[in-house]
Image (cartoon, rainbow, N blue to C red):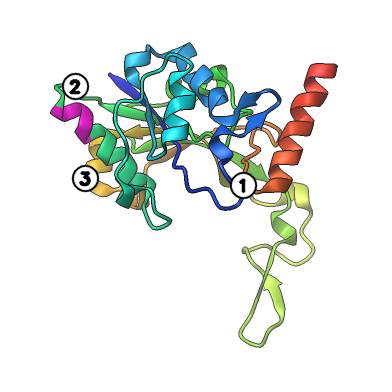
Amino acid sequence: MKTLFIIPARGGSKGIPHKNIKPLCGKPLIHYSIEVARELANDNDICVSTDDQEIIATVEKLGLKVPFVRPAELASDTATTNDVIIHALNYYKENGIEYSNTVLLQPTSPMRTAQQVKEAMDLYDDTIDMVVSVRRCENSVTIFREDSEGFLIHAFDVSKGIRRQDALPLFEYNGAIYVINNQRLVEKGLQNFDKNRKYVMDEKDSVDIDNELDWIICESIMKYAREK
């Protein structure tokens, strides 16, 4: 199997301006994902997909060439990850390179390690759609939704008074690692994947930076780890 590592990094971050190149503990955020990819692949198989010249300059200072500038229509708020991956795969195909699977590494998960990505990749084979990293939902019995009258009811099918440790295990995507079957991606699209294996990560490594609070939490964890 030939694997393409894609790091998607559009310039139009609203929650944290210039998030992907903002310094986190001394390094631009995107550097963490690039370092992980470089432990597992040659530079020729690493693709930073971006529309932003500042991001391109930051990446190329590391000696990693950005192969193309992502079109503006694929850098809007409505553009999908599916479209971004297909665009990258088509670029390489037009240049005579075809990949059987893709590892998607979002820059917003700087706590993920190369070992974790390798372990997720080891779970993949071409009979499935995707291996995806998750974290366990520890408080599923305390999650509620409103009914039609505005009263709170259990969001999940749990018996009244069930102990947390007896609840059915539930998981949520943490955004850190996606190992994708490219053929299934073209045929079905990410939104229609139904043969997905989980790779479980802990709460710390599952930090996904979406806003300033997430940034503060991640920065604090990193500083604490370095000071131990």
Contact, CB < 8 Å: mark 3 with mark 1?
Answer: no
Q: Which residue matches tag 1?
A: 16
Q: Position of residue 41 (x, y in %)?
A: 40, 14
Report crowding for label 3: few under 14, some 14 to 19, many 20 or more residues within 10 A (C-alpha): few
Magenta: predominant secondary structure element? Answer: helix
Work out whether 38 lies above or below 135: above
Quarter residue 221 falls in = top right
Q: Which residue matches tag 2?
A: 97
Q: Which mark is residue 48?
A: none
Q: Amino acid at mark 3?
A: Glu
Residue 24 is left or right of residue 174, and the answer is right
The CA distance from mark 3 to mark 1 is 35 Å
Q: Which mark is residue 187?
A: 3
Q: Position of residue 78 (x, y in %)?
A: 39, 58
Work out which quarter of the rendered image holds the N terminus and state it: top left
The CA distance from mark 2 to mark 1 is 35 Å
Q: Earlier in the sequence, mark 2 or mark 1?
A: 1
Q: Earlier in the sequence, mark 3 or mark 2?
A: 2
Contact, CB < 8 Å: mark 3 with mark 2?
Answer: no
Q: Secondary structure at mark 2?
A: loop
Work out whether 16 lies above or below 2: below
For the record, the magenta segment spans 90-94
Comparing marks 3 and 2, which lies closer to the viewer? 2
